[in-house]
Amino acid sequence: MAQVNFTLNQEEILQLLSSGNSSEALKELLRRSMNQIMLLESAEQLGAEPYERTTERQDQRNGVRERPLTTRIGTIVLSVPRHRNQPFHTMLFENYQRSEAALITVMVETVIEGISTRKVAKVLDTLCGRSFSKSTVSAACKMLDAEVNEFKNRPIEPGHYPFLILDATYFKVREDHRTKSKAFMIAIGITAKGERELLGFDVYDDESNSTWTSFIQSLKQRGLSDVLMYTSDAHLAIRYAMSNEFPNTVWQRCQFHLIRNILDAAAKNYKAGIETELREMFNSKTIKEARKKRDEILNDYSDVAEKAMEILDDGFDDSMTVMMLPEEMRRPLRTSNAAERLNAELKRRAVVIKIFPNQASVLRLMGSVAIDYHETMSQKKPLFYNTSMKKISENTRKELIVLAHEQKSKARAA
């Protein structure tokens, strides 16, 4: 989208701030910027600026209509452009309000269920500036649930995602008059062109062999196939499910998680030194160079960090699977950081709720946030290009399959 410019002179700024109500000032700034965005969208759709004469013009302006938009800093009234023949379309409401609406409906639901604190009710009052009836919340929930379920169950193009990132995070849910932790599982696919897309998410009671198998099976049933490599932490249930459902798919152990596992087992005095040397090892250009650096680390720290060095020795090979790929593909595929960033965003948006009223509300809010993240992520610069994928020879592919079966045998023997 083209750059958006809007102006506010010093007198207007001072007037806004002198009111003593920072919330109202922010609302006014937000209102003006969003109105400017819609004016730009209108000009793009019409093919002409106001009063501009051009052969590219597609339609005529026809005034504006007011539309309230509920945000976390209150309700603002926007001036939505109108066109004479073709309706005006804006991505602003769709992109901005999905997760906002989900957040508000879940908060309202906690109040209606009677399990929230007065603090949450006060926050809700501040956010929305009005009360909500049960029927209003029910209708909003149905709309959001339909959108989340449609995205969650959409078909996956077979063979389109050679790389997969898997992870999970937890949220507290009220169930049977008790507070329980529920696992929110996510799967991010990476195409041969290096494009990232959120393939799926769902809520489960825990991270067991059966729940991870159920999640992976749901991806397969929707069309996921021919996955060359997946990246995750060392959770045994993930490995169990993937080795059974995708036996020819090799595992890349997340290097970030391995570093964290190693440092957690080391004494405080040695953490900084070990971490520096581990990063040098993972940045090695060749597997031979990496093994040499590993041996140096083991030799230097085995006496003072025995448990940490055992973790390094045991996890080294699985964390170096990416060394079989072209060099430019290694860094973006060696960790599950893309999933970790999504998890951080999910946690950030859940902080107001603290305890969800039911499992459906977790899926509603976290699913909406995840969809927003997917749309942002899919527009980012590719991690690599199709030319990199073409560098992976048939012989390398066979070697990766052999390694996948070796990993499965090793895991069963452990």
Image (spheres, rainbow, N blue to C red):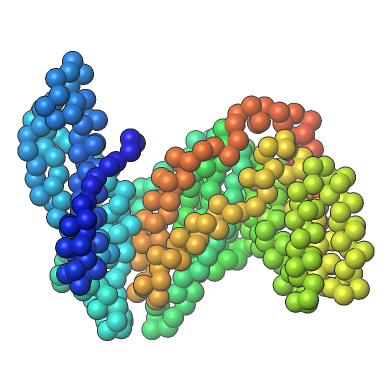
Image height of 407 relative to 50, above or below: below
**Residue at 64% across, 27% down:** 387
Which of these two is toward me, 366 or 351?
A: 351
Q: Is residue 330 toward the left or the right of residue 374 in the image? A: right
Q: Which residue lies furthest to the top in this view?
A: 55
Find residue 245 and report its horizontal and vertical position in percent: 63, 49
Find residue 134 and report its horizontal and vertical position in percent: 18, 70
**Residue at 39% across, 81% down:** 176
Image height of 401 relative to 53, above or below: below
**Residue at 68% across, 55% down:** 254
Q: Is residue 331 toward the left or the right of residue 308 in the image? A: left
Find residue 292 and report its horizontal and vertical position in percent: 90, 51
**Residue at 14% across, 44% down:** 80
Find residue 132 and report its horizontal and vertical position in percent: 17, 69
Q: Is residue 332 toward the left or the right of residue 408 in the image? A: left
| Residue 201 in view (yes/no) | yes
Q: Quadrant of the C terminus?
A: bottom right
Which of these two is toward me, 159 or 373?
A: 373
**To which quarter of the image does residue 278 belong?**
bottom right
Q: In which quarter of the image is the N terminus?
A: top left
Which of these two is toward me, 318 or 18?
A: 18
| Residue 360 in view (yes/no) | no
Q: Is residue 300 toward the left or the right of residue 179 in the image? A: right
